[in-house]
Amino acid sequence: MTHAILYSFRRCPYAMRARLALAVSGIQVEIREITLRDKPRAMLDLSPKGTVPVLITPDGTLVEESLDLMYWALRQSDPESWLVTASQQVTLTRQLIQQNDSEFKQYLDRYKYADRYPEHSEIYYRQQAEKTLVILEQNLAINGCLVSEHITLADMAILPFIRQFALVDKDWFDSSPSYPLLKVWLEQFLSSELFESIMPKFSPWQDGDDIILFP
């Protein structure tokens, strides 16, 4: 085992944020694409929680949370200064990601799968999620990006989830006049070489397959 092993799922926003940090840091890992309906035993033996990303290093260190994985990569190599150091920016980063990963993710899931949550309508769940979009739009207006004039960990930890939100009802999102800066921010991300580099399609990994390195 000469490289860390990353278990990933292409469309999962948590796995996306991890791959973004690995790609920008230039740290190569062995990537193993999974399917959610047939998770490999090798991954479940490492991490019984059964969610991606999961990374195991050559020395046996296990990283099971996407943000921890981002920090693991960026603390080794951060060529684009995604890690902020100013205390105010550190605090804002923490607040925005916490908002995204808790309240926004909850309503995003209900908006995306509204038929599974008949307590409220799809529009209700979207409106609740929009409270986070308002906060992001305000920060983009102040800073240019979420916490700084340039892209940082906060942007890249949150962008995959905004991508998912926009795709639930793309016609509505594209025609909404409420988030002009957010739309530009998202489009710049989606059209970037970095985003393209983390989205190749791999066949689901099986024991005995050839090693695939990423990036």
Image: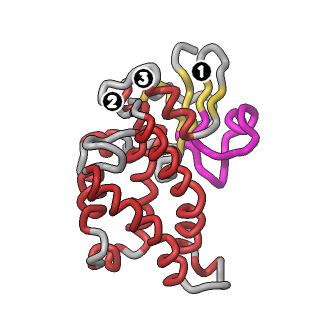
Q: Nearer the viewer, residue 209 or 194?
A: 194
Q: Can you tell which quarter of the image residue 165 is in?
A: bottom left
Q: Nearer the viewer, residue 79 or 207?
A: 79
User: Where is 194 relative to 2, above or below?
Assistant: below
User: Contact, CB < 8 Å: mark 3 with mark 2?
Assistant: no
User: Where is 140 relative to 207, above or below?
Assistant: below
Mark 1 vs mark 2: in front: 2
Mark 1 Cα-neighbour bin, 10 Å: few <14, some 14–19, many ≥20 = some
Q: Quadrant of the N terminus?
A: top right
Q: Is residue 53 left or right of residue 22?
A: right
**x, y percent for residue 188:** 24, 52
Predominant secondary structure, magenta span:
loop
Of the two numbered discs 3 and 2 on the same chain, state the one appearing first in sequence.
3
Q: Residue at x 55, y 51 (%)?
A: 98
Q: Residue at x 41, y 63 (%)?
A: 135
Amino acid type, mark 1: Thr
Give the label on residue 27, or none: 3
List the residue tagged with mark 1.
57
Give the label on residue 81, or none: 2
Of the two numbered discs 1 and 2 on the same chain, state the one appearing first in sequence.
1
**x, y percent for residue 159:** 39, 53
Amino acid type, mark 3: Ile
Q: Secondary structure at mark 2?
A: loop
**x, y percent for residue 198:** 37, 41
Cα distance between the residues tagged 1 and 2: 24 Å
Mark 3 vs mark 2: in front: 2
**Which segment is the magenta one?**
33-54
